[in-house]
Amino acid sequence: MKKVIAIAALAISGFAANAQVSSTATQTVNLNLSNAIELTFTGSTTATGAAVNLAFNTVNDYANGVASAAQELKVRSNKKFDVTVKANAANFTYTGTTTPAPVMPVSGVLALKVSANGTGGTIASPFSATAYNGLTATAANLISNGLNGGNQTFSVMYNATPGFAYPAGTYTVDVVYTATQQ
């Protein structure tokens, strides 16, 4: 009987010698996120959109105004955001042959409406999707509470009604959009 026990003990000690041994190592990975926001025109994929040319060719254009095609902008932000809009000056800059140069105010001539809103936010009053509202050199809320995301788009359309008081030439103003995180 002693021989059987010795063989069993040898088999058990051989099994323990083949057991796997392991070791672990741990490393912490930190993502150091900063608040980030970007506003671009989708047509140019930059912060500068293509020039919008509104041609006044008939008396009806002067009387009724001329509207632009939709201009799409995209916001990418990791937080909720608001968008404001303003003209960069109170008056258009004139290029032409009339001397002295005529002074056309932006207020009362250039207006804007939000033709599409995919930001998840709301169009801020007095702007709307159905009617044009005048622009001035003072920033006005355009979009409120836009949701964070990488493809938050909205489109605007311009309408200009200069009337008959101004001579031929090119009248220019920049429209400035600003997206601000909340």
Image (cartoon, grey):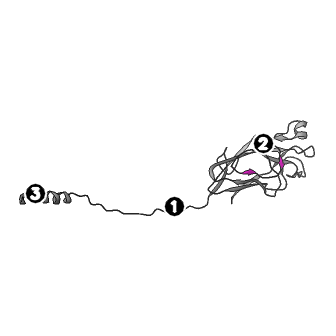
Q: Residue 1 — which label?
A: none
Residue 57 place in picture, x, y as percent: 86, 36
Q: Looking at the image, is mark 3 or mark 2 nearer the viewer? A: 3
Please tell me whether residue 49 is drawn above or below residue 13 in the rendered image.
above
Which residues are drawn in magenta?
A: 120-133
As shown in the figure, which amino acid type bears the numbered disc 3?
Ile
Classify mark 2: helix, strand or loop: loop
Q: Is residue 161 magenta?
A: no
Q: Mark 3 points at which residue?
A: 7
Classify residue 170 by image quadrant: top right
Please tell me whether residue 182 is drawn above or below residue 151 in the rendered image.
below
As shown in the figure, which amino acid type bears the numbered disc 2?
Asn
Q: Residues within 10 Å of mark 3 (few under 14, many from 20)?
A: few
Q: Which residue is drawn at 66% across and 45% down?
A: 42
Q: Residue 53 — which label?
A: 2
Taking depth in this image into account, of 20 and 122 the one nearest to the observer is: 20
Q: Which residue is drawn at 36% across and 63% down?
A: 25
Quadrant location, the C terminus? bottom right
As shown in the figure, which amino acid type bears the numbered disc 1?
Leu
Badge 3 or badge 2: first in the primary sequence: 3
Q: Looking at the image, is mark 1 or mark 3 nearer the viewer? A: 3
Q: Name the residue under label 1.
A: 31
